[in-house]
Image (tube, helix red, strand yellow):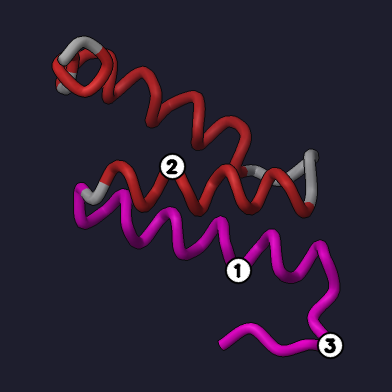
Amino acid sequence: MISDKTSSHDLAEELYERGNAFRREQRWAEAMNMYDAALAHDPASPAGPAREMLTEIMNFYCKDYYNP
């Protein structure tokens, strides 16, 4: 659980880990949202490369998400 005293870096790390959990469950939108939130708190977060990889996965497997 996120506490009020969590640093921005720690919060970004927690959001990144949540994004990874969603990605493993193939819950792409939730994973993307977590990675975006992590990057908002720490632009140097490993969520950046993870988001790029997820975007590539979605572009390959989920073209209809972008072109309804």
Q: Which element carries disc 2, helix, strand or loop?
A: helix
Inspect the image, locate mark 1, and give the three-letter code of the amino acid beneath it: Glu
Q: Which residues are magenta?
A: 1-26
Q: Are marks 3 and 1 in contact (CB under 8 Å)?
A: no
Farthest front residue in view: 68
The residue labelled by disc 1 is 14
Which residue is more in the foreground, 20 or 39? 39
Q: Which element carries disc 1, helix, strand or loop?
A: helix
Residue at 79% across, 49% down: 42
Q: Quadrant of the N terminus?
A: bottom right
Q: CA distance from mark 3 to mark 1?
A: 13 Å
Which residue is more in the foreground, 39 or 67? 67
* Apparent side of residue 56 relative to residue 8 in the rendered image (left or right): left
In the image, which is nearer the foreground, mark 1 or mark 2? 2
Q: Is residue 8 above or below residue 25?
A: below
Please tell me which of labels 3 and 2 falls first in the chain. 3
Please tell me which of labels 1 and 2 falls first in the chain. 1
Q: Position of residue 35 (x, y in %)?
A: 54, 46
Q: Is residue 37 above or below residue 66?
A: below
Please tell me which of labels 3 and 1 falls first in the chain. 3
Q: CA distance from mark 3 to mark 2?
A: 25 Å
Q: Which mark is residue 32?
A: 2
Q: Which mark is residue 1?
A: none
* Residue 23 lies in the magenta stretch: yes
Q: Which element carries disc 3, helix, strand or loop?
A: loop
Q: Which mark is residue 5?
A: 3
Residue at 64% across, 83% down: 2
Inspect the image, locate mark 2, and give the three-letter code of the amino acid beneath it: Met
Q: CA distance from mark 1 to mark 2?
A: 14 Å
Residue at 79% across, 81% down: 6
Q: Position of residue 30 (x, y in %)?
A: 36, 52
